[in-house]
Image (tube, rainbow, N blue to C red):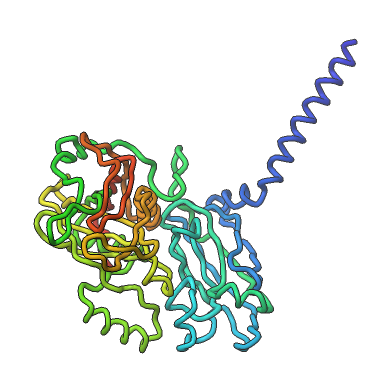
Amino acid sequence: MKLTKYLTLALLAIAVMALGAGAGDSAGRISSSKQASFANKTYQIEVDASKQWVDTNIDLRPGEKLHITATGTITYEKGGSFGPDGLARNFKDLIHQYAVTDAGHGALIGRLGSEDVAEPFLIGASKDYVAPIANRLLLGLNQSEKDAQTAQGSFQVTIEVASAGASSAVPAAAGGPVEAAIPFITPDLLAKIPRRVSDPQGDPGDMVNILIVGTQDEVVNVFTTAGWVQVDKTAKESALAGVEATLQKKDYLTMPMSTLFLFDRGQDYGFAHAEPVRVVMSRNHLRVWKSPYTAEGRPVWCIAATHDIGLERDQRNNGITHKIDPAIDDEREYVNRTLSSTGFVARRTHAMPANPLTEAKTATGGSFHSDGRILVLVLKTGTSLGY
């Protein structure tokens, strides 16, 4: 009887061990990648020409350093053959939506995190890369979906872990810092911030749904790094920049936006984030004002962020204006994810003011709704342009 009992226990133990091994195998590529920081491992990844993105299954930590090299050849049906640096861009490329606008057509590129918010970067034949945040590394080609349908060949990519990232007893949150209360974002400060901006006639418009704490350089840098571009202030600037962008074979995203008012003045900055050929009809965009208030010795910036999704009738004058997505919290969180992906956000939280705005109309008559919370991002100090 005892022997049967011991045999049963032994079989159970073996079964548990087998289950554990099976679970490890099912996530084996992810588990081995997490050990990269400690083992300085080298990975071999093939990027097939028919793929837009390839998941490396390598989860990086903040500050983890990689040395990436690539070889191989890819051939386009109507473009010839090329290596990891891609084909030189030409005027025909202006109408295409490539992930990295100033990189070669078909070049090897990478991104850290989800496609909708991560800013892709050029790898080419060789690159030293430092992960700004914790997230999954993906590799891809700077090409259109149509290119992928007929492309032949692949790149062979070697990823060497040069040094480990930040170590901590608490794993880093993917996509940016863990949310936590920020003591200096007080009810008194929130009460001073206007809930809405206004048009030149004084009609209330978009909601102030984001606050950023940082210097001017730090604010401009975090948006620029996240792939947002400054928009032109006038139609004349727009035309000139459009010609210049065409001559430089660059996509043009800086079409002007209207002037709105907060603290009795127009916005200090306008930023946009969009796919180039859709910029007229649809883009993520926002306006930025420096407030008269500070937090821990740095300015507090107020932001009204909305997402243009088409055109509609301007109820003030029966003209045509951009229609915004009424679910404006989605745009607030888009800004949250894109800026946090840079590694330049030190702290973040969502704060609820005493008089939250949950439903209203824009100055042009369109409606929007919100849960009333304000996103607060505190930037790392010293992260100016060129940092």
Q: Quadrant of residue 343?
A: bottom left
Percent x, y for residue 241? Answer: 28, 82
Quarter of the figure with the C terminus? bottom left
Taking 141 as reference, is 169 left or right? left
Q: Residue at x 66, y 78 (%)?
A: 151
Q: Residue at x 56, y 68 (%)?
A: 140
Extreme residue toward the top, this view: 1
Extreme residue toward the front, this view: 318
Asked if residue 28 is positioned above or below residue 318 in the image, the reply reads above
Q: Residue at x 45, y 38 (%)?
A: 170
Q: How many marks?
A: 0
Q: Quick one: 7 or 294, which is closer to the camera?
A: 294
Asked if residue 367 is positioned above or below residue 111 in the image, the reply reads above
Percent x, y for residue 342? Answer: 38, 58
Q: Residue at x 29, y 48 (%)?
A: 377
Asked if residue 326 is positioned above or below residue 181 in the image, the reply reads below
Quarter of the figure with the N terminus? top right
Q: Quadrant of residue 266?
A: bottom left
Asked if residue 147 is positioned above or below residue 37 in the image, the reply reads below
Taking 119 as reference, is 263 left or right? left
Percent x, y for residue 253? Answer: 35, 73
Q: Quick one: 266 or 220, which is closer to the camera?
A: 266
Percent x, y for residue 370? Answer: 33, 43
